[in-house]
Image (cartoon, helix red, strand yellow):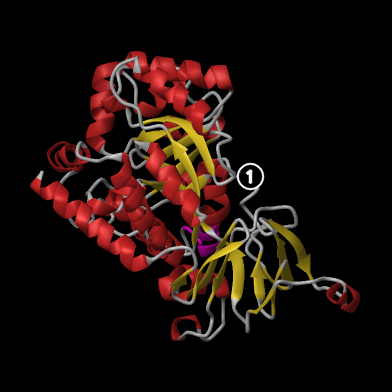
Amino acid sequence: MIRFYGGKVLTMQGGCELRSAEVWTDADKIAFVGEPDAQQLENTAFEREIDLHGDVLMPGFKNAHTHSPMTFLRSYADDMPLQDWLTKQIFPMEAKLTSERIYHLTKLAVLEYLTSGCTAAFDMYFMRDGFVQACEEMGFRSVMCGAVMGAQESARELEEDFEKYNGKSPLISFMLGFHAEYTCSKELLTAIGGLAKKYGAPVAMHSSETRREVDECIARHGMTPTQLFDSLGIYDHGGAAFHCVHLTDDDMQILKKRNVSAVHCPASNLKLASGIAPIVQMQQAGIDLALGTDGPASNNALDMFREMYLMTVLQKSVNADASACSPQSVLTAATVGGARAMGLADCDVIAPGKQADLIVLDMDKPNMQPVNNIVSNIVYSADKTNVRLTMCAGRVLYERGEFAFADKEEIYANANRIINEMKTE
């Protein structure tokens, strides 16, 4: 059992109110939240007691859209529009990947997640065995989603992965998914709708990321991507739509009706000039929102603090309303909303019985003082330097700049070796 005491707790249960409380974890679960009496303390044996010294304990951030192994393409193909970036730079390099390379590249991403206070990632990629091995070795939680493309036959691969990876590990799960409308035949999309019905399962995909994507989908099918997916039964059991930059009012009503989370990726959308998602309008429509970084090839960081800041300030600007997109709503999207989008119902808040996926934010930094409003400080002022500790499934994976289960120098060396090899192949 691990005891956290002497600080403030932001449980995210029913809002963003902080409380003075202790949190105890037992194995991978939260065992106690509150103010213990003398007898409870006397009768409990702790393997470790962590004095927060006034710091904030809160649920870890959930990076609800990313492509972790793409660390090898960080700063490799910048300043290009999405379609050229994908077809001329990204896809040719990805063709050189192996499961062994993905294993090493994923480890680099996990280091960055931990320093950013991220305790789970919603990952879309391929050659998943290397990815799973890396996450399990480092103790990091991940939800994978399918990334199939092409013809109807790819649905078989998606179903096989769904059955293979779910239940494999307490840290790993798999959601049905596909890359995007523009990389899939209608026959494949129809088959995926059939899988959603067969398993009663949600589906995740890139959707409405660019204006070109939406216009070409309408030209092909007479419908927006959202309307098309709904017509094929893909959304019948909910899911997650990544980006959602160019949505119609009807699209928003579909997402709300079908309980589909919209995953916002502001930094990537800005860098690729895809646009700014209508977050305020989605909030008004009652759509569940989550927050993600997208991959390290298009962001180029895996930093949830930067995403939170951009989410709110962009909405204030485009809506000409300084009160738009409150820090409370942003923090909810980055934690509870991400857990909801990823199907991690036991990782959303700090409460007994929930998973011990926690972070500690250091308040003893100039950017967190004075303490007028801690939630505002987290969204508007904090950055990765404020992450004092990251715990996943009850294990402290990162603390005060040190990684518990990883040799960072070895991971850096392997990542650089891999990209240098690929450039010459």
Which residue of the protein is positioned furthest toward the right in this rendering?
Answer: 39
362 lies above or below 245:
below
Instruction: Name the residue beneath numbered marker 1.
Output: 345
Q: Position of residue 159 (x, y in %)?
A: 46, 22
- Residue 189, image quadrant: top left
- Residue 55, image quadrant: bottom right
Q: Position of residue 85 (x, y in %)?
A: 17, 43
413 lies above or below 256:
below
In the picture, measured across the screen, residue 8 lies left or right of residue 274, that is: right
Question: 132 or 21, which lies in front?
Answer: 132
Specify the principal SS of the magenta part.
Answer: helix
Residue at the image point whose x is 8% and y is 48% from the top: 424
How packed is label 1: few (under 14 Cα within 10 Å), some, or many (20 or more)?
some
In the picture, measured across the screen, residue 310 lies left or right of residue 391, that is: left
Q: Position of residue 283 (x, y in %)?
A: 51, 47
Q: Which residues are magenta?
A: 325-331
Residue at the image point whose x is 52% and y is 55% from the top: 139
Q: Quadrant of the C terminus?
A: top left
Can residue 421 be seen from the camera position used here?
yes
In the picture, measured across the screen, residue 240 lies left or right of residue 41, that is: left
Can residue 253 be seen from the camera position used here?
no
In the picture, measured across the screen, residue 301 lies left or right of residue 352, that is: left
Residue 326 lies within the magenta run:
yes
Residue 320 lies within the magenta run:
no
Q: Amino acid at mark 1?
A: Ala
Q: Quadrant of the N terminus?
A: bottom right
